[in-house]
Amino acid sequence: EGLVTVRPRRGAVVRSLSKEEFLELYQVREALELMAVKLAVPRLTDEHFDELFALNRALDGHAKQGEVGQFFDANLAFHAGL
């Protein structure tokens, strides 16, 4: 894809993205995540919803307390649960 250049005996370098490329990638990601949620939600049980609500409350608490590391851990757990 041209995003990584491997240089012999020097390692790999990730190419910088332009603003337009970055925005385009996020638009694609947004569309994929929306489709994933539409497919996942009908399959969730009450227990899944309870867990997701608890993780969402944890996210809110970490955000309010400025707990960045814990916020991202909870965010990862939320998305993994979904």
Image (tube, rainbow, N blue to C red):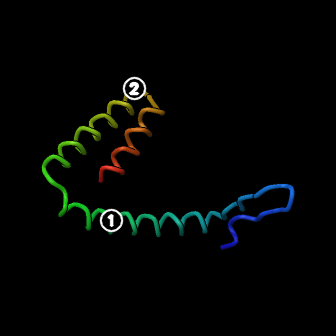
| Vertical relation: 26 (above or below) 48 | below
| Vertical relation: 7 (above or below) 65 | below
| Residue 38 falls left or right of residue 76 | left
Q: Residues within 10 Å of mark 1 (few under 14, many from 20)?
A: few
Residue 65 marker: 2
Residue 36 marker: 1
For marks 1 and 2, give the one nearer the viewer: 1
Q: Residues within 10 Å of mark 2 (few under 14, many from 20)?
A: few
Whole-percent x, y for residue 18 in the image: 66, 64
The quadrant where residue 62 appears? top left
Q: Quadrant of the N terminus?
A: bottom right
Which amino acid lies under the numbered mark 2 shown in the image of this protein? Answer: Gln
Whole-percent x, y for residue 57 in the image: 27, 36
Query: Element at badge 1?
Result: helix
Q: Quadrant of the C terminus?
A: bottom left
**The furthest residue to the right:** 9
**The furthest residue to the left:** 46
Quote the CA–CA distance across marks 1 and 2.
30 Å
Residue located at (22% from left, 42% from top): 51
In the rendered structure, are the residues bearing label 1 and label 2 in contact, judged by CB atoms less than 8 Å apart?
no
Q: Earlier in the sequence, mark 1 or mark 2?
A: 1
Whole-percent x, y for residue 75 in the image: 39, 43
Count of numbered badges drawn on the protein: 2
**The furthest residue to the bottom:** 1
Residue located at (20% from left, 49% from top): 48
Which amino acid lies under the numbered mark 1 shown in the image of this protein? Answer: Ala
Residue 70 marker: none
**The furthest residue to the top:** 65
Residue located at (47% from left, 67% from top): 27
Residue located at (42% from left, 38% from top): 73
